[in-house]
Amino acid sequence: MNSDWNKDLKVTFTVQDPCQLVRKSLGDPIAEDLRFVVKAVVGEENFIDMTPNRSNNFCCGGGGGFLQSGFPEARRYYGRIKFEQIDQTGADYCITPCHNCHAQIHDMKEHYGGKYHSVHLWTLICLSLGILGENERTYLGPDLAEVNMLS
């Protein structure tokens, strides 16, 4: 896996630190591992960290069952600080290693009119390996939709 695909494109990325994995469980060491992988697949020069980050990062508001609770307006209200945090980075994409974070961050982008795309971490790993299938590009914007397309 490498970031050669993004050398000329210079698409920028930030990453969401999942609460369950980082804040509640393994802490900053796993957040560092996450950044190592992200920088390896997108290029260190194309990574913009949120502030605050790692164990001090803000919750997206979608975890702990809230995503499925049936209270979307409350969930969006509590997640607004995360939306603003992502927006302030100016990154083109927010990488989400957690499925709940992905769904919440994507929903807030749609609801609040964000300019970023939300993308699963595995999507970028596969993209960097040149093995991302045509049907696995749902959350990629037009800037990445054709990158490393399998023939």
Image: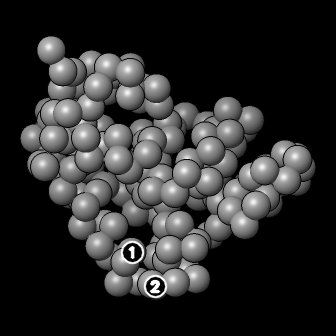
Q: Secondary structure at mark 1?
A: helix
Q: Secondary structure at mark 2?
A: loop
Q: Which residue is mark 1?
A: 31
Q: Residue at x 31, y 66 (%)?
A: 35
Residue drawn at x 72%, y 66% is 64
Question: For this view, does 129 lie left or right of residue 47?
Answer: left
| In the image: residue 82, left or right of residue 70 | left
**In the figure, 25 relative to 86: above or below?**
below
Q: Position of residue 90 (x, y in %)?
A: 46, 46
* Distance (Cα) linking label 1 and label 2: 7 Å
Residue 109 location, x and y as percent?
64, 38
Residue that label 2 marks: 27
**Residue for point 30% across, 43% down:** 124
Say above or below: 81 vs 24.
Answer: above
Q: Amino acid at mark 1?
A: Ala
Could you tell me if residue 143 is visible in this image?
no
Do labels 1 and 2 touch, CB within 8 Å? yes
Disc 2 crowd, CA 10 A, few/some/many (<14, 14-19, 20+): some
Residue 1 seen in the figure? yes
Q: Amino acid at mark 2?
A: Gly
Vertical order, 99 against 23 (above or below): above
- Graded by Cα atoms within 10 Å as few (under 14), some (14 to 19) or many (20 or more), the crowding at tag 1 reads many
Image position, residue 99 (x, y; %): 55, 51
Instruction: Answer with left or right where residue 20 lies relative to residue 92.
Output: right
Q: Quadrant of the C terminus?
A: top left
**Dot label at residue 14:** none
Residue located 33% across and 67% down the image: 34
- How many numbered badges does the structure rendering display? 2
Q: Quadrant of residue 142?
A: top left
Q: Residue furthest top?
A: 151
